[in-house]
Image (cartoon, rainbow, N blue to C red):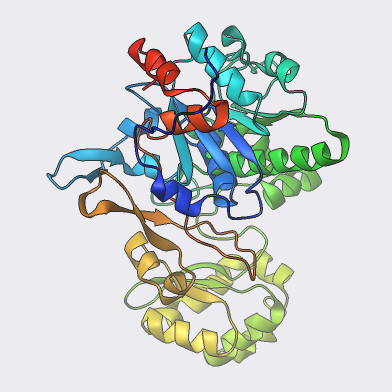
Amino acid sequence: MLLRRPILRLRSSSSSWRRHAHTGPLSHVRVLDLSRVLAGPWAAQTFADLGADVIKVERPVVGDDTRGWGPPFVLDDDGKRTESAYFLAANRGKRSLAVDMSTAQGQEVIKAIAAKSDLLIENFKVGGLAKYGLGYDDLKKINPGLVYVSITGFGQSGPLAKRAGYDFLIQAMGGLMSVTGAPDGASGGGPQKVGVALTDVLTGLNAAIGGLAALARKDRTGEGAHVDCSLLDVCVASMANQALSYLVSGKPPTRLGNAHPSIVPYSAFAASDQSLIIAVGNDGQFARMVEVMGMAELAEDERYKTNAARVTNRVELEAKLQPAISAQPASYWISTFESVGVPCGPINDMAQVFDSPQVKARGMRYEAPHPTAGGGTVPQVACPIKLVGEDHAPRAAPPTLGAHTDEVLLEVLAMDAEAIEALRAQGIIQ
């Protein structure tokens, strides 16, 4: 591979990425993203949201698997499909480098970028990258300070380490489905998965936290690290109070539908037109709630006076509350309860979410320029992490496949145009 003085000739425009680059608290960090699908890309996207230069390595021609996961797809001006909504959800703010890592030349390109990177994220099976010479032990020889984040289904050790892990499977094995869904015997009873790949998302966030912790330690010691993050570990850890309830009592928690195992009333109630959520968190809120409902005596009843008593007498209390709530529309109760500080709210679909004045005020949706989308932009969901007083310019749209191949090779590796075209002619890059 020839590393010569750069010739400024790029194959594709990257102005959109550049407008948003070099801002944010991690603008000094370079991340090499060797992951695909959701957990790994979500972790890398978090770094991009915080300003890091994230270089996403993809297979030529095919790219990340999720580029083909649809419908829905974004359409171009002629009505032809371009990017999938799934891919757009987890790859904003990145640069795409299309290189074939199954070839020796492709491996050398990736190694050279790893040598100039601060952090690497991968979600291959245990040992999957070692066969390409890209495992942690391989790369730390050329970059001892590299933080190498591995995301797997079951971790780097244990009897299931070599098994593939998928969100649905992990929600089942990690206990989440055992507490999600209506109880046995109820209409529609049975275990349910959460409606989004939550263990993937949570694992991505935990992987980002682990990577940041390793980078902070590197600032003090100069040493890199291998961060081992698994979907199963994250799912078990994220069971929070449900996990500790079992460890303390010895009794596995069960499915309660929308009800809470330790707080009452904390559930969905049917108003005259639609359901709403009531989330009473303490005895004072309960007293104010029943007072505006004209049922103040319930707050003095020993069966309902304290939260512990309400949990014990859950069925009887909810049977008393439900008829009164059913007599008025949801908007009436939301307004009434909010006026006395009782937490409540509607059950929104996604259209209602993005139409919400609060969500709009927080800038949670924006349009990002995109070269192939009809109208020239794609919708994006903003990063929820906001540093007060700092610029929060929306990140660039997820890249088209190989959009930054030339740019990355030229800027990061100082490879000249002839060397780049030679790799392209051999099908090693796109």
> Viewed as shown, does residue 43 lie left or right of 379?
right
- Which picture quadrant has residue 298? bottom right
Q: Residue 22 or 397: which is nearer the viewer?
A: 22
Task: Answer yes or no: is residue 394 visible.
Answer: yes
Kindly identify the residue that appears in the image at 45 percent across and 83 percent down: 333
Kindly identify the residue that appears in the image at 87 percent across and 40 percent down: 220
Query: Residue 6 placed where, x, y %?
Result: 50, 28
Query: Residue 126 placed where, x, y %?
Result: 62, 17
Q: If the image is split into quadrants, where does the C terminus sit?
A: top left
Q: In this view, does 350 lie above or below 81?
A: below
Kindly identify the residue that appears in the image at 45 percent across and 33 percent down: 407
Q: Which residue lies furthest to the right in this view?
A: 221
> Viewed as shown, does residue 205 lie left or right of 322?
right
Q: Is residue 363 above or below residue 205?
A: below
Query: Residue 290 placed where, x, y %?
Result: 58, 86
Query: Residue 284 placed where, x, y %?
Result: 70, 83
> Viewed as shown, does residue 102 lie left or right of 230?
left
Q: Residue 211 or 281: which is nearer the viewer?
A: 211
Task: Answer yes or no: is residue 192 visible.
Answer: no
